[in-house]
Image: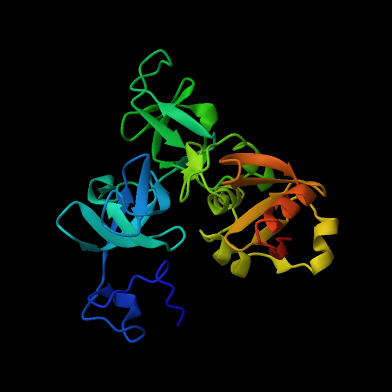
């Protein structure tokens, strides 16, 4: 089996019960489902606040926890994309009612009452999942008693038609390795958030996306790019806006930017990295 540690909850001392017979481990555990309670939660490579940020989990996402180290960290697997790593224990709660809505704006504020003049109690990112109990005026009222602007919410099963348009909204967002929100995002996080908003399941990292998304075009595909095509380099991915421009989160600009495609390809090639694939999703 594919034992990519990013997607396989298995260590020498412990592994998920569903992997029994497929991997070697001292013991196998069923795990327990939790819900992400914080607006934005880091998933780290090791149980330490200074360990590498591998990705982030948004409020309302589900995670299966297999181990807790007793020092504030829990090891588990995200339900949305299967990513494995260490979560802050304090960011987890027992699952409550299923989410009914999600944040569709880049980010929004949660108010303690039905007025935008009140000091917000939280800031939530696009993709955060919430249980909305009722509509009250211009607000959706969540199970936490928060009031969120109704125009910033969509039903949990609603999808946008153009995922590239979602990615374009992130232009100017600072680059953050492992980031998954408008406070900071990386190249593959941008692709994942945008495609998820359009109802397309998407793995987390660029190599996984290259392997798992769309069909590959021939090497001349860069000359006939369509909106929504994905261009891959080793460790990087960009989204074609049209035949001539791309949108991507990149460390060169330390931001999500729109670039001329041929200029970006030449710039990246100058660093020693050629394109590895061009994928078309439809």
Seen in the image, is 111 located left or right of residue 271? left
Colour scheme in the image?
rainbow
User: Which residue appears farthest toward the top when viewing the image?
Assistant: 117
Seen in the image, is 256 located left or right of residue 22? right
Q: Judge by depth and name the residue closer to the eye, 196 or 188.
A: 188
Q: Judge by depth and name the residue closer to the eye, 66 or 257.
A: 257
In this rendering, the count of numbered labels is: 0
User: Is residue 161 visible from the viewing direction of this image?
Assistant: no
Is 168 above or below relative to 81?
Answer: above
**Residue 190 picture location, percent across and down:** 57, 48
Asked which quadrant contains residue 52, the reply is bottom left
Task: Tell me the quadrant of the picture where the N terminus can be found.
Answer: bottom left
Residue at image coords 24%, 74%:
14
Seen in the image, is 219 located left or right of residue 95? right
**Residue 139 picture location, percent across and down:** 45, 24
User: Is residue 193 visible from the viewing direction of this image?
Assistant: yes
**Residue 85 picture location, percent across and down:** 34, 60
Is 128 above or below relative to 272?
Answer: above
Residue at image coords 68%, 51%:
239
**Residue 128 picture location, percent across and down:** 44, 42
């Amino acid at each position: 089996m594919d034992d990519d540690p990013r997607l396989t909850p298995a260590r020498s001392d412990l592994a998920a019960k569903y992997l029994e017979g497929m991997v070697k481990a001292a013991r196998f555990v069923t795990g327990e489902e939790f819900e992400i309670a914080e607006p934005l939660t880091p998933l780290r490579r090791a149980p330490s606040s200074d360990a590498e940020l591998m990705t982030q989990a948004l409020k309302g996402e589900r995670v299966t926890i297999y181990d807790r180290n007793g020092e504030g960290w829990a090891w588990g697997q995200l339900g949305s994309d299967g990513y494995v790593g260490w979560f802050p224990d304090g960011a987890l709660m027992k699952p409550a009612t299923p989410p009914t809505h999600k944040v569709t704006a880049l980010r929004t504020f949660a108010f303690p009452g039905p007025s935008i003049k009140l000091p917000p109690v939280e800031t939530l990112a696009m993709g955060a999942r919430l249980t909305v109990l009722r509509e009250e005026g211009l607000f959706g009222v969540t199970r936490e008693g928060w009031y969120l602007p109704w125009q910033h919410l969509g039903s949990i099963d609603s999808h946008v038609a153009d995922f590239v348009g979602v990615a374009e909204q992130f232009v100017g967002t600072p680059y953050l390795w492992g980031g998954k929100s408008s406070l900071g995002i990386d190249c593959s996080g941008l692709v994942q958030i945008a495609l998820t908003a359009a109802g397309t399941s998407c793995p987390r990292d660029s190599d996984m996306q290259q392997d798992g998304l769309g069909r590959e075009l021939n090497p001349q595909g860069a000359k006939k790019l369509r909106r929504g095509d994905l261009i891959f380099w080793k460790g990087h991915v960009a989204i074609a806006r049209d035949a001539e421009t791309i949108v991507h989160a990149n460390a060169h600009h330390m931001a999500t930017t729109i670039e001329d495609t041929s200029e970006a390809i030449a710039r990246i090639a100058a660093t020693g990295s050629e394109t590895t694939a061009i994928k078309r999703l439809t």
